[in-house]
Structure formats: structure tokens, C-alpha cells
Amino acid sequence: IVPILLQKQYKPDGWLLFIIGQLLYVDFNKYEFSRAMQMLHKELKVEFMIETDAKAVGEKEDTVVAHSTAYISPPEISIPLIVSENILEWTQAQVQDWLLGHNLRQMSRLFTGCNGRGLVYLSKYIKNCESEQVLKLLEADSVRRINESISLIELSCFQSLLHEQKKLLQSMIQR
């Protein structure tokens, strides 16, 4: 199930929240349509589609011609969209691609609108502030922005991957 959000200010509740509460939303209100469709295709692992037209069979006057679309997924080969190794140059879209490419779905929703420089600043806050305070602030942001408690497992993976990116940046600077 890949939920899509088309209505502004909509928050699922009840049985729907129970079913899709921990899933990644593709929010068509936060992104331009083409970007939201790209994210939806990525979630569905759809790379291209083939359209087929079905013709009516028989002579009935009330027969409808059906138009269907068949989605075909190629083998799972993901091509990273991040061009620069320098995290400071990453755009918001590249940050989203990096997070989703590392299966950090909750972090991708939480850090919507964040560019690479923002991730570096966040990393400094995490490193230099008291961990309990940082966790409380991240939890509050998570509940406020995406209506979910923060996943410590995903946060740990995020910190590890971010640390690797910062090491890469430092090695580039030292060259």
C-alpha cells in the first residue's frame, strides 16, 4: 500500500490511520505534480509503463472501449540521482532521493524541505547538544510534522549514513 495525499490538511484517523499509519505518504500538496509522480513511481518501483488499448468485440451499440495502463517494473536497479559527492551542494530533491535510496522513509517525510546544508547543521546539533534534548526535539517535530513517533532505528541509520557523508566531504576538502 502506498498512500497518496491529495487533499490539503487531511489527516487520516480511525481504521485508515491504523492501516497506513507507518507508511510513506506521497503528498501531492507539498511537491510539484511531476516530482510527486516521480516519488510515487519510485515507491511503486515503476520505471516505465506501457499503454494498451482494448477494442470492443462484437456489435453492441452500448459497448465501451476500455483504456488500460499496464505498469512494468524492471529488475531492481536503482540509479542514484545525487550528482555531487559534496553534501553541501545537495538540493531538497537530492536529499529526498538519498534518504529514500537508503530506505529512510520516515526521515524523508520528516526532513521534507531540507537541503544538504540543513542536514550538516542538523548533524552538528545532534553532535553538540545533549542527546536527550535532541531526541525530545526530534520527537516533537516528528509528531507535529508527520504525526508519528520517531523511529530510533531509522534515526540511528540516518546518523550513521550522515556521518559517512561528512567523512567523504572532509576527505574532499583535504585533497
Image: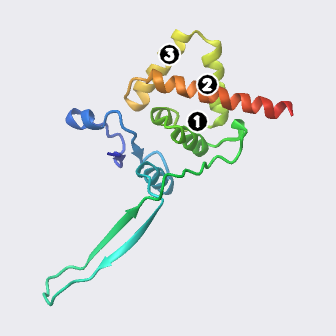
Q: Secondary structure at mark 1?
A: loop
Residue underneath mark 3 = 135
- Does residue 23 appear left or right of residue 122 in this picture? left
2 or 1: tag closer to the N-terminus: 1
Check contact, mark 2 vs mark 1: CB within 8 A.
Answer: yes
Distance CA(mark 3)–CA(mark 2): 12 Å
Residue at the spot x=24%, y=38% of the render?
Answer: 16
Q: Residue at x 82, y 32 (%)?
A: 173
Q: CA distance from mark 2 to mark 1?
A: 10 Å
Q: Quadrant of the C terminus?
A: top right
The residue that mark 1 highlights is 114
The single residue placed furthest to the right in the displayed view is 175
Disc 2 residue type?
A: Leu
Q: Decide: is 104 above or below 50.
A: above
Q: Is residue 97 above or below residue 158?
A: below
Mark 3 residue type: Leu
Task: Choose mark 3 or mark 1, whichever is in front.
Answer: 3
- For the residues labelled 3 and 2, say whether their Cβ atoms are less than 8 Å apart: no
Q: Which amino acid type is marked by label 1? A: Cys
The tag earlier along the polypeptide, 3 or 1, is 1
Direction from residue 25 to residue 125 in the image, left or right: right
